Image (tube, grey):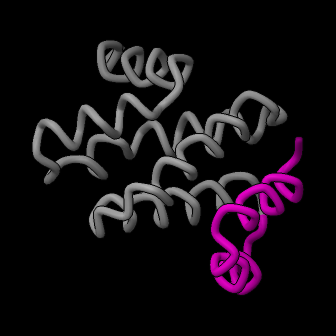
Amino acid sequence: MNYLQAVQEITEVIPDIQNELNKNTVQNSYSTIRIFTDQIKKMIQDNNRSLLFKSLQKMDTIYKNGDLMLRNAVESTFIYSLDSCTAFCNEEYRKTIFNHISLDLQKIYSKQIYNHGI
């Protein structure tokens, strides 16, 4: 899957995101995942759990089926931002969010957290 296919996948879950993706001047894997991550962050803040959980599943699908650029974008944009996205969540909500993230993405998150400074 390339970033254009990822855009189609994302708009299946969040149809309203299409306008934001279209008005983005730089259209590539990183900008697509950044916009999707921003939407996920907003869902977390708004406690929109049903759409959040569907979006987290979609992020996993994009990661599993994506080309190297998409996979790198998910790792360096979405995974890297998880702490800031969940910083103000209570412990129970944070655990619920992480329970809806695939094991593969959880492993990458742990690797990033524990390998800092190396």
Give the mark count.
0
Q: Does residue 24 appear to the left or right of 9 in the view shown?
A: left
State the image coordinates of residue 78 (x, y, percent, origin top left).
50, 45
Residue 36 to residue 58: above or below:
below
State the image coordinates of residue 20 (x, y, percent, origin top left).
64, 81
Which residue is more in the foreground, 43 or 30?
43
- In the rendered view of the protein, which quadrant contains the C terminus? top left
Which residue is more in the foreground, 65 or 91?
91
Q: Does residue 104 appear to the left or right of 45 in the view shown?
A: right
State the image coordinates of residue 70 (x, y, percent, origin top left).
74, 41
Q: Residue at x 53, y 44 (%)?
A: 56
Q: Which residues are magenta?
A: 1-27
Q: Residue at x 29, y 62 (%)?
A: 47
State the image coordinates of residue 112 (x, y, percent, origin top left).
40, 22
State which quadrant residue 110 falls in: top left
In the rendered structure, does residue 112 fall within the stretch colored magenta? no
Q: Residue at x 70, y 86 (%)?
A: 19
- In the rendered view of the protein, which quadrant contains the N terminus? top right
The overriding secondary structure of the stretch rendered in magenta is helix
Residue 93 to residue 52: above or below:
above
Q: Residue at x 73, y 67 (%)?
A: 11
Residue placed farthest to the front in the image?
Answer: 50
Q: Does residue 6 appear to the left or right of 45 in the view shown?
A: right
Q: Does residue 101 appear to the left or right of 17 in the view shown?
A: left
In the rendered structure, does residue 20 fall within the stretch colored magenta? yes
